């Protein structure tokens, strides 16, 4: 029966790895975790004269390089001047040459978001009138190509190595201390360390090309590597390598001095290893938390330690599961039922921590129920939740087998002294009988091998142990796919960011169309705002009808990013005609309904390009002012 299982195990592992590879391959370029929320000039707009500069606004801070922002004329020639610079907060700009001719201009950008992921894109605007342009921006994708695929693979292997290293060591130290002397367990944990170290070095080499040109030839560019070391992501990878050096010392003690100590001496060493191992494991987990999703956005100070706990819970559960699988299939030393039960308790605690931290992370990254189905991040998260539920279900079956597990260790260990006496007798007689002792030693080794094989057959014949092996193998298969989905999830734009970007693009499109039809009798302006509070993001819309000199009807609508009415305490509007130094003309609209204010007979004294400033207050202390120009009259 055991012989028939081994090929099935290999086949299942190959299929699972192929499925994970397919997930990583079809993940595509890393999704933008900082979204473009505004630009000046806006996308698709036609301006009367060429601007002095182009500015882009993102949903979070980004890192710039010399070529992060480029502006191309209709012939594809770069017309930006100097290096990109920060305008204000999350707005970045680049100066343009003077005297630019009429035509359509292409703005391209490639930056690195605060959570370490590359962001790229392009849009066009026109001066005077649109023109035919042959500028191609199809290559403006961040994190794609061979380098992007290798980087995604490296991320997957780094997560896998971390899980096996931390979970395997925790399983040996906390559940099965006899496993410290078992070769397959030693190879498993050391393999996890080697995998994580190799993957970290690979990510460090790929980082410069991944966030820049995307060319394979730039992987070994020392200048790019030097630039990477000065970034947050580079510092996190270097920190991980330093912690891996400490992890190597931990492994050498765990599988060296620890295994040779007596039981009384082991107790003190167990405590020291547990403290040191926890510190190193938490540090390794923090190397992800400090540079990715948890480090930016809402409640970053809470999100980073929560992310560390989440990663440690995943590693303890899935890594321990892998160690248990190795112990059941590869180890000649039988694993005691008590050790399996201890791991079952540890796994249950890990699942509780995993669910608690996962709920918080889901709320933080999505922000609304609709984001589960309307964003790619939410859809992947639903898949992950389904896999976790399936894994918990299979684990429940494993717990049932664990409670029925027949412990054959005692019976098997009773034979060990007898084998040792036979071997010792053969060795002792060999000193006196010369050549005959060699034959006796060979017989003793053969007898020991036969006894080991017999014990293994007896152990494998236990139906409860066989059932546990099958259920643990199924758990491991689901865990491999779960890890692949999680890796893709960490490279996907969070639901909050995606919804905010959609709202900003809709506002920009609406504003552009309203500007183009300013003389049609109405003007609509949409402006995104963020008061900085826990619930301060939204979109404010201002309508002027008929948008002419004299009396006008003004309506103000305030919505959340998902389009729902935003109930806030106060809205104020001010109009300024800067060219004639008129204003600001303060307007206090009346509240009509939730998210709706109105003012009648708003007087516009003369035609011109009016600046419409709206002050939005979402709480007693949180408020902000946003503005946009509109041609009225």
Image: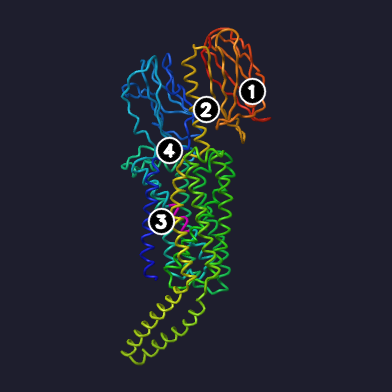
Q: Residue at x 56, y 22 (%)?
A: 541
Residue 571: assigned label? 1
Image spot of residue 458 (x, y percent)? 44, 77
Give the mark nearer the N terminus: 1 vs 3. 3
Q: CA distance from mark 4 to mark 2?
A: 21 Å
Label 4, on which residue? 118
Q: Residue at x 46, y 66 (%)?
A: 469
Where 192 sits versus 446, above or below? Answer: above
* Range covered by the magenta-colored residues: 158-165
Residue 161 within the segment the image draws in magenta = yes
Residue 195: assigned label? 3
Q: CA distance from mark 3 to mark 2?
A: 42 Å
Give the mark nearer the N terminus: 2 vs 1. 2
**Mark 1 touching mark 3, by CB under 8 A?**
no
Label 2, on which residue? 88
Q: CA distance from mark 2 to mark 1?
A: 24 Å
**Mark 2 touching mark 1, by CB under 8 A?**
no
């Amino acid at each position: 029966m055991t012989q028939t299982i081994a090929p099935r195990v290999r086949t299942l592992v190959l299929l699972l790895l192929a499925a994970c590879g397919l997930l990583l391959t079809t993940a595509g370029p890393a999704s933008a975790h900082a979204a473009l929320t505004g630009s000046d000039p806006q996308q698709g707009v036609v301006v009367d004269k060429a601007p002095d500069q182009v500015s882009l606004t993102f949903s979070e801070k980004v890192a710039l390089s010399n070529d992060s922002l480029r502006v191309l004329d209709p012939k594809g020639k770069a017309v930006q001047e100097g290096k990109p610079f920060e305008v204000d907060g999350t707005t970045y700009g680049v100066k343009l040459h003077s005297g630019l001719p009429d035509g359509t201009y292409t703005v391209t950008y490639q930056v690195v978001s605060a959570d370490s992921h590359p962001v790229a894109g392009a849009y066009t605007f026109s001066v005077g009138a649109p023109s035919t342009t042959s500028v191609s921006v199809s290559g403006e994708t961040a994190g794609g190509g061979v380098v992007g695929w290798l980087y995604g693979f490296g991320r997957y292997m780094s997560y896998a190595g971390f899980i096996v290293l931390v979970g395997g060591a925790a399983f040996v130290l906390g559940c099965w201390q006899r496993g410290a002397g078992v070769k397959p367990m030693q190879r498993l944990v050391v393999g996890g360390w080697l995998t994580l170290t190799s993957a970290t070095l690979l990510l460090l080499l790929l980082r410069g090309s991944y966030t820049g040109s995307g060319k394979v030839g730039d992987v070994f560019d020392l200048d790019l590597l030097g630039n990477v070391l000065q970034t947050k992501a580079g510092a996190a990878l270097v920190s991980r390598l330093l912690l891996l050096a400490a992890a190597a010392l931990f492994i050498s003690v765990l599988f060296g001095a620890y295994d040779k100590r007596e039981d009384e001496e082991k107790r003190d060493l167990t405590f020291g290893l547990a403290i040191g191992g926890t510190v190193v494991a938490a540090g390794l987990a923090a190397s992800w938390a400090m540079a990715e999703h948890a480090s930016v956005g809402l409640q970053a100070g809470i999100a980073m330690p929560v992310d560390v706990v989440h990663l440690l819970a995943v590693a303890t559960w899935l890594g321990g599961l892998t160690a248990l699988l190795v112990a059941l299939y590869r180890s000649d030393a039988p694993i005691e039922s008590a050790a399996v039960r201890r791991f079952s308790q540890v796994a249950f605690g890990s699942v509780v921590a995993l669910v608690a931290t996962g709920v918080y992370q889901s709320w933080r990254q999505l922000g609304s129920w609709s984001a589960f189905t309307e964003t790619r991040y939410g859809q992947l998260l639903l898949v992950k939740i389904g896999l976790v539920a399936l894994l918990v279900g299979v684990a429940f079956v494993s717990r049932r087998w664990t409670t029925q597990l027949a412990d054959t260790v005692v019976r098997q260990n009773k034979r060990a002294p007898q084998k040792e006496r036979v071997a010792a007798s053969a060795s002792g007689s060999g000193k006196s009988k010369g050549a005959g002792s060699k034959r006796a030693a060979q017989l003793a080794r053969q007898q020991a091998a036969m006894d080991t094989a017999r014990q293994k057959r007896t152990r494998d014949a236990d139906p409860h142990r066989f059932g546990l092996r099958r259920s643990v193998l199924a758990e491991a298969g689901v865990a491999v796919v779960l890890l692949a989905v999680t890796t893709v999830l960490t490279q996907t734009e969070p639901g909050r960011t995606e919804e905010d970007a959609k709202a900003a693009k809709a506002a920009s499109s609406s504003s552009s169309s309203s500007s183009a039809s300013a003389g049609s009798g109405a003007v609509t302006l949409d402006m995104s705002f963020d008061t900085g509070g826990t619930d301060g993001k939204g979109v404010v819309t201002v309508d002027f009808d008929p948008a002419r000199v004299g009396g006008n009807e003004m309506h103000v609508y305030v919505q959340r990013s998902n389009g729902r009415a935003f109930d806030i305490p106060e809205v104020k509007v001010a109009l300024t005609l800067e060219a004639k130094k008129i204003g600001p003309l303060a307007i206090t609209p009346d509240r009509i309904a939730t998210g709706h204010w109105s003012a009648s007979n708003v007087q516009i004294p003369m035609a011109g390009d009016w600046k419409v400033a709206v002050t939005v207050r979402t709480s007693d202390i949180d408020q902000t002012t946003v503005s946009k120009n509109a041609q009225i009259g």
